[in-house]
Image (tube, rainbow, N blue to C red):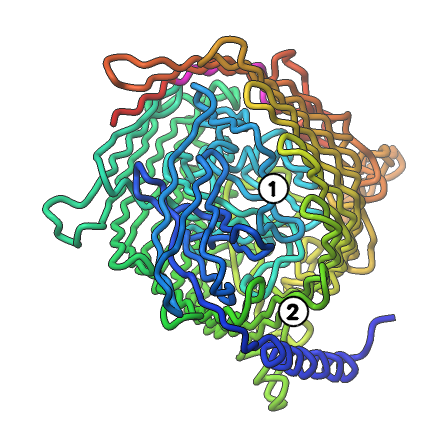
Amino acid sequence: MRANAQDRTTMALTNYRLVILGLFACVALSAGQERTYTIKGSVVDSLSGERLPYATLRIEGSSIGTYTNDQGYFVLPGVPVQLRRIIVSDIGYKERIYELKRNTPIVEALFQILPEPTTFSPVEVTGQYKGQMKPVAPSTTVFYPSDIARANGLFNNDIVQAVTQLPGIVTVGGMSNQYYVRGGAADQNLVTIDGIRVYNLFHAFGLFSLIDPLIVKVADFSSGGFQAQYGGRLSSVLDVETRDGDMHSYNAAGSFDLLSTDIMLSGPVPLGILGNSSSFVGFFRTSLYRNALGRYFGKNMPFQFFDGFGKLTSDFTSTGHISIEYFSTGDQITSSNPADPNYSWRDIGFALSGNYLFSNQYSLRFSVSTSQYRAEQIPQSSNYLYYESDKIIDPAFFGELTYYPSPGSQLDFGLLFTFPSYNFTFTNAFNIPLIINDQEVEPNMWMKYKWELIKDLDAELGMRFDLSRAFALLSGAGKGYVGDPRATLTYNFSPDASLYLTAGEYHQRIISLNNEDDIYTPFELIVPIPESSSNLSDEEAYHYILGGRFAPLNVFGMRAEVYYKDFAKLVTANRNKIDKNDPDFIMGSGVSYGLEVTGEYDVGTMYLSGGYSYAKVTENSAGFEFFPRYDRRHQVNISSGWMPPPGFWLRAHWEFGSGLPYTALNGFYPQLVIDPTNLSGYPAGLTTSQLVFGQKNSARMPAYERLDLSASYRMSILGMDCSSELMLINVFDRKNVFYIDNVSGDVEYSLPFIVNLSLKWNLK
């Protein structure tokens, strides 16, 4: 039985005090007086000058070491003065040993390492398991460009294709315009590009995303248990860091396929305008054929899209940089059927950000950004469709101060102030147009501390505060909560094996007006949860994860996790509204739990990876308990690649998923037709047939299965690297069910057999 509100408040306050006391006690205990020095700086690619995320640094002859952060910077305090040799390495780079000769308390270093590609292929397979010796949090997968290139997708080996091939991630019908993570709804997934929140991730009804692999430096995907620096969503986080550009030479790259073409330019900023260590990246992608969607949806849907991205970066020292970037993306879909509406989407983002290491043990990160999302449904001539629009403007300020008291320990304080405004127009169930303008203020603060509790046992405690919610609760001015406590314990059996346990509380203030009853959602309205309603509150969930990683060899690794997610509070649109006085939103709850196992084997010229998940999801809404439509019990993903001669790759991806639930039609019953003005028909027994539906989502669709194959070849032509790839999607043309019309019984199938050809080039 759930605790009442007073008990919950007391528990939250107790957690808050314990975390604060623990943080400062551990910082005090970690201080030492041994003669040591601090190394700080960055690790960069010696050819391009770009900083490398998650590179490894280790002091020779000791167990002292660290990693660069996602920006490529590091701070390593507490190094004994007698140890002066440091080993620097990263996946796909030659290991290098530096000898530090300066005998000073603080050593600033710029470590350069040389790329060491082991294959001549579009995929830089390195023969090293990427989960080994990396600072990967529980339930988190790190994607490098080479990982994205492995993901067999319809176009350009998309980042979202790579994400949706992980265990525990469910899509409907093989398209990823919405993905569901460990039983969470689609609107519970946070996506950021360099810290900018993105509200619409997809093009072409979900065939591919707006994040092109050419601009990605690294992407972290967390399917649960994420720490206190992330908030505002219940289920998952996709955090993408874009590349900075080549600081030493100019280069151009691009591609085209049967749907689109793109180009990227990169290089040092000319004439030293921003200094000698400055670079730029420019990227543009656009559709080629207006009627290309007819190949995938079986009807004429003229379609256009574009993506634009630009970024300037200046490394003013070896310990700091500043960047300014802008992206703009949009879709326009027009229907040849006047009864169908047209659709328009637009995403715009801007950010000024920086990272600076100062003093001997501190790091400062900041960002001033804004994002804007607009979507429109535009009727043509239909009498039952209405103009609907959604516009979100989301300015934000982010700052994070990190203190490194000793090797392996880290204390973070962060602020995120956002000021989103929501403007949406839609028509409710009683054909009443609603135009709502809402301005929110979301001041967030967090802190977390990571340290070695005892030998081989690491702890990470965090607390995230929504200051407006905390103030409302503590002052008695309204509904709220004190904070979201989060904790992780990791026991390292060896450098190659670990066991971890994590738990956390999460809240969410926005929802989608669509819900799991919608078969497909080409148009999505995102709204804040109304605060004026006394029976509504922020959505709330609790994550519990137990897992382990094992990587005994450089070429093999595996991970296994069991999880339990308690969705204590869920808010959904009221689809059973029959009276204008009925509420537009209702509260519900849910539970999700499951098991996930992944493994990878990579020897350079051949790789094999696979994942299996078992999951069960139940939801309770308006007193009814049911399985939501994304409750997939069993799922298997297997990917493989083989390079027979140099430069030639054969790849395959096989996916199997057990059937998704839907509500079946049980039958009909006759209903008498009575006209009060003419009762003569009553003796004749005039009737109409009324539908009888079964229990909600009690039936299951057939299992989903798809095999994708690809072959690629890379060569050098006149100094330009060129590659071509032939992709065969759904090779056996399996009739995978997209949805079943439970009234007519008609079946709509997902992607048919598709052939796509892409050509890529890179000129340096």
1 or 2: tag closer to the N-terminus: 1
* Relative horizontal placement of residue 185, taking residue 108 as reference (left or right): right
Q: Confirm whether the magenta stretch covers residue 754.
A: yes
Identify which residue is drawn at 79% across, 82% down.
7
Task: List the single residue furthest toward the left.
Answer: 271
* Relative horizontal placement of residue 141, taking residue 241 as reference (left or right): right
- Dot 2, crowdedness within 10 Å: few (<14), some or many (≥20)? many
Kindly indicate the quadrant of the structure image that contains residue 501.
Answer: bottom right
- Dot 1, crowdedness within 10 Å: few (<14), some or many (≥20)? many
Task: List the single residue furthest toward the bottom.
Answer: 475
* Relative horizontal placement of residue 521, taking residue 535 as reference (left or right): left
Identify which residue is drawn at 57% across, 75% down.
465
Kindly indicate the quadrant of the structure image that contains residue 369.
Answer: bottom left
The region drawn magenta spans 751-758
Mark 1 vs mark 2, foreground winner is 2
Taking 574 as reference, is 444 above or below it?
below
Q: Is residue 492 visible?
A: yes
The residue under label 2 is 461
